[in-house]
Amino acid sequence: MKNREKTGKAFRIKWLLLALVAAALIFVPAASHKVSAAKLVYTVKFNNNSGTSKSKTYTALTRNVTLNTTIRLPAVPKAVGYQNLGWTTRKGSSKVVYKAGARVKVRKDMTLYAVRRKSRYYTVNFYLGNGSTNSAYKKLQKKVEEGTYYTLPAVPSRSGYVNLGWSIAKNGKASTAKKVGTKIKISGNIRYYSVQMQSVKVNLRKANGTVWKTVTLGKGGYLKLPSVSNATGYTFMGWSKTRRTGSSTDPDYEAGELLRISKNTNLYATVFNRALEKDISSDEMAHPAIGMMYSKVIFVGDSRTAGIQATLKKQMSSSVTNGVSFVANPGKGLSWFRDTGYAQLIEEIDKTEGSKPIAVIFNLGVNDLGNAGNYVSYMTSIASTLKSKNCKLFYMSVNPINSTMITKAGRGARTEAQVREFNSKIRSGLSLYYKYIDMYSVLMKKGYGTNARYDGVDDGDDGLHYTTKTFKRIYYYCITYLNTGSINASYY
C-alpha cells in the first residue's frame, strides 16, 4: 500500500514537472522573438562638431539601414573659411575617425560629427612677363582660400602686343601659357607672369583688293586660313600672297592651312570665274579603251559619283558611257560599301564579258572623312579578291569642298583640312594595291564649280557637289588617266 502511495505521488510530481517545462517552452519562443526583433533598423546621423545643428544640410545625410549594412560616408558639408577633414564619433572631438568616402559597417545607431580646421589664405600675384609690375597688375592681386578654384583674369592690355595668357615662369612660352578664364586650384602662394607677343596684322583681302577682314595675332604665331563663301558664278579657291586679276586658280594657300605670320601681311582671295570653265561636248569627251585595254570600267562612290552618272546620261550621247557602269549611293560611305555596295560591285564584275582587265575606280570618303584608317584596312582586305577577278584598282581623291558653303546649305560639317588629311592617308595607305588618281590637285590648279544638285541639273551651290561642267571634266580626266596613265589637263 505504501509503495502504491509513493508511486502515485511520484507520478503526480513527474507530471507536474512536465507541465512546468511545457509552460516554459510556450513562453521562451515569445521572449526569444522579442529579443531578435528588438532592433531591425539602425540610424546613422550626421551633425556639426558641437552636435547642435538642425540644418537640412546635415539632416538630409541621415541613413536608415539594416544591421551590418555597409555605407559610404558622405563629404562633410562645406563651411566658409574652413577645411573639411572628416568625421568623428565623439561630439567636440578634433580626432578624425573616418574620412569622407570611407566604408563603414553599421552595427548600432550612430551619430558622426564634422571635423574641420580653419582655412589658410594664399596670395595670387600677377606680373609682366619679365617679372616687373605696375598698377594694372597690382590691382589683380588676390587673397584666395586654400582648396578653392580661382579664375585667371584678363591680361592687362599693352600697346603693340597681343595677350596669350599666363605662365608660372618668367618670359613664358605661348605653347605652355594658361588661357584667360582657366580655373586653378589654390594650394599655396603663387605668381603668374603675363605671356605677350609683339602683334602683327594679317589683312585678308577680297579678289578686288579691298579688305575683307583684319586678324591680329602674335608675331611668329599661326593663322588658320579661313574658308570664304562663293560669290555667284565664282569659286573661292584659297589665298595668295599677291593680287591676281580676273579669274585665277592654284592659290598659294588653301583654306584650313596653318600659316606662320612673322610680319604684317596681306593675303588675297583667289577666285575662279566659272563662266570660263570648259563645257565638254559629246564629241570632245574621252572614251574608255573598251576592248583594247579594258573589258569594262566601273565607278564606285557616293552622290558625287551619282552626279557624274546623271550628268553624262542627260548631256552626253549613250556611246560616251559604252562599257561603263556605276555603283553609287548618295550620302553613303564605307559602311554602305562594306554591307551592300561590295556585293553590287562583284555582281557587275561577274557579268562582264571579255578577257581584258576591268578598271574599278573608287571615290568614297567625303561622307566619313574621319574613317580613313578603316578605309585603308577594308580596301586592302578586298584587293586580292578583286585582282583575282582581273580587276585593275584605282582610288580617286576626295575632291575639293567649300566648308562655308556646306554649312550654309545645312549639309554635314566637313572641312578642307579634313579632305586633305583623308587623301594623304588613302594615297600612302593603299599605294601597294591601288593607283591613286589625284583629281584634287588638278581641280585646284584648273578650277571647278560647285552645285547644290547631283541629278544633271545646275541649281544653287552647296560647296559639296559639282556643276555639270565640272562633273564632265572629272569623268574626262579619269578616262584619260585610264587610257594613258596620266591626267592631261592642258585642254580642259
Image: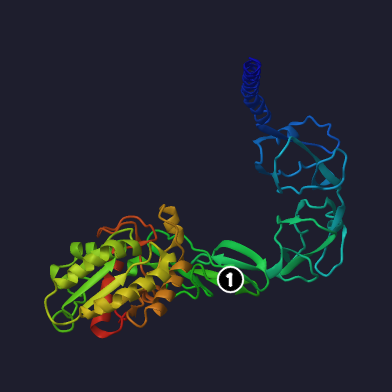
- Relative placement, left or right, of 393 versus 273 is left
Is residue 357 found left or right of 278 in the rendered image?
A: left
Q: Quadrant of residue 430?
A: bottom left
The outermost residue toward the front is 1
Residue at coordinates 48% horizontally, 61% vertically from top-left? 228
Compared with 2, 473 (above or below) is: below
- Check the picture and name the quadrant holding the C terminus: bottom left
Considering only vertical position in the picture, is 138 above or below 44?
below
Coloration of the structure image: rainbow
Secondary structure under badge 1? Answer: strand
Q: Is residue 50 above or below residue 144?
A: above
Q: Quadrant of residue 60?
A: top right
Q: Residues within 10 Å of mark 1 (few under 14, many from 20)?
A: some
Q: Is residue 333 visible?
A: no
Where is residue 32? Give x, y as percent: 65, 28
Q: Position of residue 15 (x, y in %)?
A: 62, 19
Give the camera-side residue of 318 and 339: 339
Q: Amino acid at mark 1?
A: Asn
Pinpoint residue 315: horizontal percent, then vertical percent: 20, 64
| Pick the front one: 381 or 477 | 381
Residue 48 x/y as whole percent: 82, 37
Residue underneath mark 1: 266
